[in-house]
Amino acid sequence: MALATFKGGIHPPDKKELSKNAPITEAKSPQRVVVPLSQHLGAPCKPIVSIGQEVKKGELIGEPGGFVSAPVHSSVSGKVIAIGEFPNAMGRMVNSIVIENDGKEEWTSLKDNPDYLKLSPEELKEKIKAAGIVGMGGAAFPTMVKLSPPKEKPIDTVIINGAECEPYLTADYRLMLERPSDIIEGLKVLMKILGINKGFIGIENNKPDAVEKMKAAAKNEPNIKVCELEVKYPQGAEKMLIKAVTDREVPPRALPMDVGVVVQNVGTAVAVYEAARYGKPLIERVVTVTGEGINKPSNLMVKIGTMISDLIEQCGGFKGEAGKVVSGGPMMGFAVSTLDVAVTKGTSGILVIPEEGVTHAEDFGPCIRCGRCIDICAMGLMPSMLSILSEKGRYEEAKEYNLFDCFECGSCAFVCPSKRPIVQLIRLAKSQTKP
Amino acid sequence: MEATKKEHELIVTVSPHIKSEETTSRIMWSVNISLLPAVLMGAYFFGPKAVITIALSIISAVLAEYVFQKGMNRKVAINDGSAFLTGLLLGMNLPASVPFYIPIIGSFVAVVITKQLFGGLGFNVFNPALIGRAFLLISFPKLMTIWTTPEAAFVAFDAKTTATPLGILKEEGLSKLIEIFGDKINLYMELLKGHRAGSIGETSAIALLIGAAFLLFRRYITWHIPVSFLGTAALMAWVFGGKNPETGNMLFFTGDPIIHLLSGGILLGAFFMATDYVTCPSVKKGQIIFGIGCGFLTMLIRLKGGFPEGVMFAILIMNCFAPIIDRGFKTNIFGALKIKESKK
């Protein structure tokens, strides 16, 4: 049987072998954490603590600044020592709360409620909202918002995204191996909230052991199906995943909810389960620290607000000269200019590319119109035209080629034989014109 | 600790942070290599003169590119193999007998006028090698149509003709062509081998097909243009190519498509020249239209035009249409069809 997938896509070397066999281990609790008040798409949080105040682990320190927003909590117990602007992975300055860790790991009161599935959808939703859960695949869209579709857009399917199509990253893979039943429970909570009985878990079939584990965990769940997907980037992009699993196509500029689907990442499902059962806020996540430039590739359970430099140190430091350090995966992640950047709810990996592994972007040639980017674009765009028009400053014309439907997966720039910085040119065009 | 980190300069660029190993020059050199079998067969049949012609063509093409780029203060990019390829293709499209200045003039027209003056690699409208050849054909019509018999030292061949199979087909008809080659099967075999008069690199069908298979296998080209090009030509040759031996009038559905596919430059054109990335449409659907146009025009010229061969002009004419074909056959954006359906 042909595996479910979408049209287009690429096959970058997956390099997951570097870290796939490293079990998730607890990262060392850092001396201090820098918790950004904006870790999600949407309005930043308002700080509700003041300098000098003692906080416990899991205590609310930032209130959501609007409907599309999510609260933030302290990931350690200790004392607030500063509130100010710190750089995030994208290089922007973000208002953040700095907490000195007292090492006591004192929690706010957590209550185990094994009957969490008996709670009403409203109560469950409230718990997810309070826990500050956002999409943990990278985009960090507040989960609460996805679970509140308008009445005219009924949802009938939830898909858990276990594709993890970004090369190198193994955080979701390890979660599927180590905590399959928690993922299933999280999915059940999501299905309960939305009042539906169709749940899928989509996994690329280069992770057969994860597929097995998830199938075993879902054995007694007639409403949950594990769906094996073809290995192809960007299989984990929402629209591509929905197409592969349900054969529905999300129209241009529309949202998954327009075709009745909600997609949540594997890590998010675990966070949902923990929030529903224990009331545990999202204060830690699995981060894959990997790449040819790091001595000990690992999968770490990291407290939000931990500095990248702390993680690098724990993983044995750089192997040789580090050329690039990327927050996220190699296809869509952000190269950071400093290691003093905090891990946020959306940080799925830290990738260290050694000096010799860096492809220099300034050395690109003209477009030879080979059409490779057109053949592989998962969105059916013509990246070659977009890049040429952007290069010439003809941004308005680029809109005729559906500029704003590009979600910058980077496949075009990957295959380009002239090594053109297509994503960069597309971003430039987007910034110079309006949709 | 803090200090050592600060010393370190990290490189910051936009994603993606990994790139495929494919490069423009690797593609160009692969195409050059794929033409090697046909060049060897050309050298075998037409002797040292053929090798000299091709070599002159390549050297002058690369030199022209170097001098132009140096003179214009542009980055010298002769290593990317594209000027080499232009020279190679031009040389393969010349009769072995041409005097030394012909490939030199042709390469200059191809590289400087057709490619560099339009902005260099990626910006030329026409296939450079074909413009070079068209220029030569119009400027030196005599020299460009003297076809020596294939007669490498160790090949005994007593054919006296100096016309190409397509020329004979046009002027004297199919029966004469078969008469020259003995019988039909022998005619096909000789055409496959390339044992016939013609341009240096176009004669050996089998060598060209080997090169084409390599390019298809490596996915440097796809089937779309060659199949639609050759398919259209074959269909037209079958439908309109037949003649009543008595009256000479057209006899429908009696043409011989195989002779048309194995003669002239159609294989070289369909696999190696019409597929030139820069001058063909980028979208697959558009490529099929492009190929059909090439096939149609080739056969129109062969059957009704003043020249026995039409591949060159067919591709050049379709080159003009490539940008507009691309505009007309934009790709379907993901999910767009669903919108149309729901509107119905």
Image: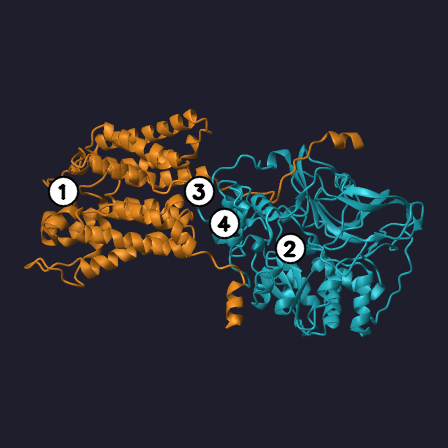
Residue A158 place in picture, x, y as percent = 67, 68
At a point 59% along the width and 54% down the height, the residue shown is A435
Residue A425 place in picture, x, y as percent = 56, 44
Question: What is the CA distance from the residue labelled 2 to the residue labelled 3?
Answer: 32 Å
Contact check, label 4 and label 2, Cβ < 8 Å: no
What residue type is disc 4 on?
Cys
- Residue ID for mark 1: B163
Contact check, label 4 and label 3, Cβ < 8 Å: no
Q: Earlier in the sequence, mark 4 or mark 2?
A: 2
- Residue ID for mark 3: A368
User: Could you say whether the residue bearing mark 4 is in a helix, strand or loop?
Assistant: helix
User: Could you say whether the residue bearing mark 3 is in a helix, strand or loop?
Assistant: loop
- Circle 2 Cα neighbour tier, 10 Å, few/some/many (<14 / 14–19 / ≥20): many
User: Could you say whether the residue bearing mark 2 is in a helix, strand or loop?
Assistant: loop
Q: Chain of mark 1?
A: B
- Residue ID for mark 2: A164
What residue type is disc 2 on?
Glu
Question: What is the CA distance from the residue labelled 4 to the residue labelled 1?
Answer: 45 Å
Colour-to-chain, cyan? A
What residue type is disc 1 on?
Ala
- Residue ID for mark 4: A373
